[in-house]
């Protein structure tokens, strides 16, 4: 009873419990893992520990009403392998009514025509399943030719670049998370 009334008051005051936000990421060389951990640190007890999509199942997504999904672009404009393998299972989760935010790692100098494309390729698969997208991010401060991840003049999620702008990642994460929390 006591815990029920505590939960009740947390909901009434708009506080959010630990399990509301789940962070899932794929990462081949560790850069997206690092960003996932920075995001989790910024969110503190609002989020659970980041989970590698390689080890995740669709039921894991169902635990959260807000999902933060991280994906790097690989093989020139393609999704990271572990996300690619997970795709057939996406529709096994219940996405309707959930809120999704995306983040991506890319290399704007090495791959200027496909910078962060995977972010869009992933969203393209998830969008028809019905969640709301938050966390769009400005393109100012990046230098690239083309990106599928830019929609209506903004990245559809946070873009980071460990190869060329690693020093900016932490401040980008901080600013992004601050905005994200306001949109929840
Ligand atoms: C073979 C190869 C292809 C890549 N293709 C792209 C690309 O098309 N677009 C992009 O933005 N980054 C591309 N990258 C850069 C990676 O996205 C970048 O290194 C990222 O930080 C890797 O993240 P991870 O360490 O989490 O796997 C590529 C890197 C390699 C080695």
Image (cartoon, helix red, strand yellow):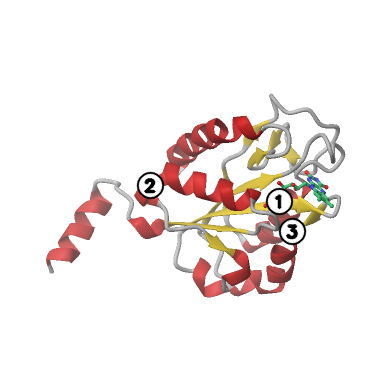
- Tag 2–tag 1 contact (CB < 8 Å): no
Q: Position of residue 55 (x, y in %)?
A: 58, 71
Q: Position of residue 181 (x, y in %)?
A: 44, 41
Q: Position of residue 147 (x, y in %)?
A: 80, 40
Quarter of the figure that contains the C terminus: top left
- Tag 3–tag 2 contact (CB < 8 Å): no
Distance, label 1 to label 3, CA atoms, is 6 Å
Q: Does mark 3 have its CB less than 8 Å from ligand 1?
A: yes
Q: Quadrant of residue 140?
A: top right
Q: Nearer the viewer, residue 53 or 28?
A: 28
Q: Position of residue 108 (x, y in %)?
A: 79, 36
The residue at 58%/63% (across/down) is 52
Tell whether 103 sits left or right of 22: right
* 10 Å crowding of disc 1: few (<14), some (14-19), many (20+): many
* 10 Å crowding of disc 3: few (<14), some (14-19), many (20+): many
Tell whether 170 sits left or right of 116: left
Distance, label 2 to label 1, CA atoms, is 23 Å
Quarter of the figure that contains the N terminus: bottom left
- Tag 1–tag 3 contact (CB < 8 Å): yes
Q: Does mark 1 have its CB less than 8 Å from ligand 1?
A: yes
* 10 Å crowding of disc 2: few (<14), some (14-19), many (20+): few
| Label at residue 80 | 3
| Label at residue 44 | 2
Q: Quadrant of residue 49?
A: bottom left
Outermost residue toward the top in this view: 141
The residue at 75%/64% (across/down) is 81
Distance, label 3 to label 2, CA atoms, is 27 Å
Numbered marks: total:
3
Residue behind mark 1? 72
The residue at 57%/74% (across/down) is 57
């Amino acid at each position: 009873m006591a815990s029920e009334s505590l939960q009740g008051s947390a909901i009434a005051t708009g506080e959010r419990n630990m399990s509301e936000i789940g962070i899932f990421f794929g990462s081949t060389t560790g850069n997206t893992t690092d960003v996932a951990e920075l995001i989790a640190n910024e969110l503190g007890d609002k989020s659970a520990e980041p989970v590698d999509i390689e080890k995740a199942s669709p039921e894991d997504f169902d635990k959260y009403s807000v999902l933060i999904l991280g994906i790097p672009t690989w093989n020139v404009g393609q999704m990271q392998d572990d996300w690619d393998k997970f795709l057939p299972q996406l529709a096994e989760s219940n996405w309707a009514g959930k809120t999704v935010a995306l983040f991506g790692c890319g290399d704007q100098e090495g791959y200027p025509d496909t910078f962060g494309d995977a972010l869009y390729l992933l969203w393209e698969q998830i969008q028809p399943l019905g969640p709301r997208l938050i966390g769009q991010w400005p393109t100012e401060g990046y230098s690239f030719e083309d990106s599928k991840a830019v929609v209506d003049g903004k990245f559809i999620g946070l873009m980071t670049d460990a190869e060329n702008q690693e020093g900016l990642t932490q401040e980008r994460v901080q600013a992004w998370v601050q905005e994200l929390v306001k949109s929840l």
